[in-house]
Image (tube, grey):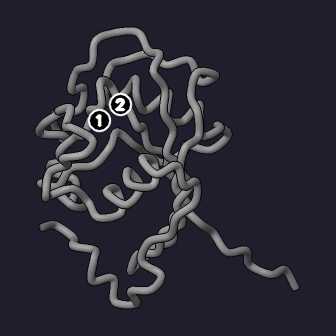
Amino acid sequence: MTKKRYKIIPAVYLLLVENNKILLMKRHNTGFMDKWYSLPAGHLDGNETSRHGIAREAKEELGINIDPNDLEMKVNMHNIFPTREVTEWFLTTSKYTGKIENKEPHKCSELKFFPINNLPENIIPYIRQAIECYKKGCFYSEWGWNDPNNTGFKLNQ
């Protein structure tokens, strides 16, 4: 008998920090945390590394080109949500080419750099936690595990 393997969703995020400001995007028409700020991000498509995945997402969402070799892993987060478990990699770079533009206005209503020490109130809680980890230099974090009802998780708020 073949045992069914447990599956976990891999996601990648871009921590783009310039002059002590971090690029955030306001979610729009996605059905998940709309009107809340997040980071440029996406799921891996399969057969791609986390560095290649976030470089692809940066091109799709922001219109910028990033060499995957210029990306550095900063935070790994293991999250649990009511319907899924996700492992998330947060990567950063200071090197890219092109001009940052909102390439997905149907999913993002705003792109804006915020002071990294003065984030907006309506930032997704686990994104805030990941940014705090980045600032403190902690590589690993978990979210939602000690909150069985995921009260920190607000869908469509």
Identify which residue is drawn at 33% across, 82% down: 150
Name the element at disc 2.
strand
Q: Quadrant of residue 105?
A: top left
Q: Residue furthest right?
A: 1
Marks 2/1 in contact by CB < 8 Å: the verdict is yes
Q: CA distance from mark 2 to mark 1?
A: 4 Å
Q: Residues within 10 Å of mark 1 (few under 14, many from 20)?
A: many
Question: Where does label 1 land, which residue?
Answer: 22
Amino acid type at image mark 1: Ile
Identify which residue is drawn at 27% across, 83% down: 151
Name the element at disc 1.
strand
Identify which residue is drawn at 21% across, 26% down: 102
Q: Quadrant of the C terminus?
A: bottom left
Q: Residues within 10 Å of mark 2 (few under 14, many from 20)?
A: some
- The image shows a total of numbered marks equal to 2
Q: Which mark is residue 17?
A: 2
Residue 11 picture location, percent across and down:
50, 51
Reply above or below: 140 against 14.
below
Reply above or below: 132 against 47.
below
Amino acid type at image mark 2: Val
